[in-house]
Image: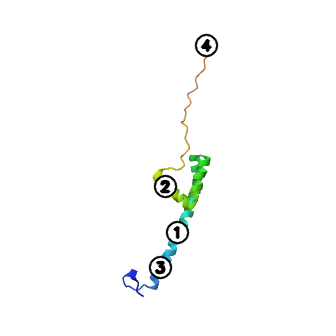
Amino acid sequence: MFGAYNDGMPTTLKRRMLRAGSWQVVKRAMKLVPIAGSVFAVGLAGYEIKKKGLIPGMVHVGLDVIPIVGATKNVVEIFTGDLIPDKKTLPKVTPEPARRLTNSNEDG
């Protein structure tokens, strides 16, 4: 049997089995990618909710967990930045040192 794709060399049974086996491995790996992405998103859920707030964080994680939607959202965010912005942080105010109250009636 001569195939057009291998320049006239006969395809051996071993080569066909190797090609079919490698295709099975590739198909299984492709099936694992969405699951791995979902597991990763759930693992970072606490961080995202803390960073974005309760409701926006839950929406962010919920979109990331859905395989096709999460992948699409992440590709869009590469080019546009976060679709769901982080919560605004209040500026930290440092307290002034306590002043000693003096009574004007006391002699000092």
Q: Which residue shows up at 61% across the image and 13% down it?
A: 104
| Pointer 2 or 3: first along the chain | 3
How dense is the environment of label 3, judged by Cα within 10 Å: few (below 14), some, or many (20 and up)? Answer: few
**Amino acid at the residue labelled 1:** Ala
Q: In 3D space, how far apart are the residues under numbered discs 3 and 1 (Cα atoms)?
A: 17 Å
Which of the marked residues, 4 or 2, is nearer the chain's N terminus? 2
Task: Answer whether labels 4 and 1 touch (C-beta < 8 Å).
Answer: no
Mark 2 falls on what kind of element? helix
Which residue corresponds to mark 3?
18
Dot label at residue 57? none
Badge nearest the viewer, 3 or 4 = 3
Give coordinates of residue 38: x percent, y percent. Answer: 57, 60
Cα distance between the residues tagged 4 and 2: 67 Å
Which is closer to the viewer, label 4 or label 2?
Answer: 2
In terms of sequence position, does the residue under pointer 2 or pointer 1 come before the other? 1
Mark 2 Cα within 10 Å, few/some/many (few <14, many 20+)?
Answer: few
At which x and y percent is residue 3?
41, 84
How would you rate the neighbour count of disc 4 (Cα within 10 Å): few for under 14, some for 14-19, many for 20 or more? Answer: few
The disc at residue 104 is: 4
Q: Which residue is mark 2?
A: 76
Say whether marks 4 and 2 touch (CB < 8 Å): no
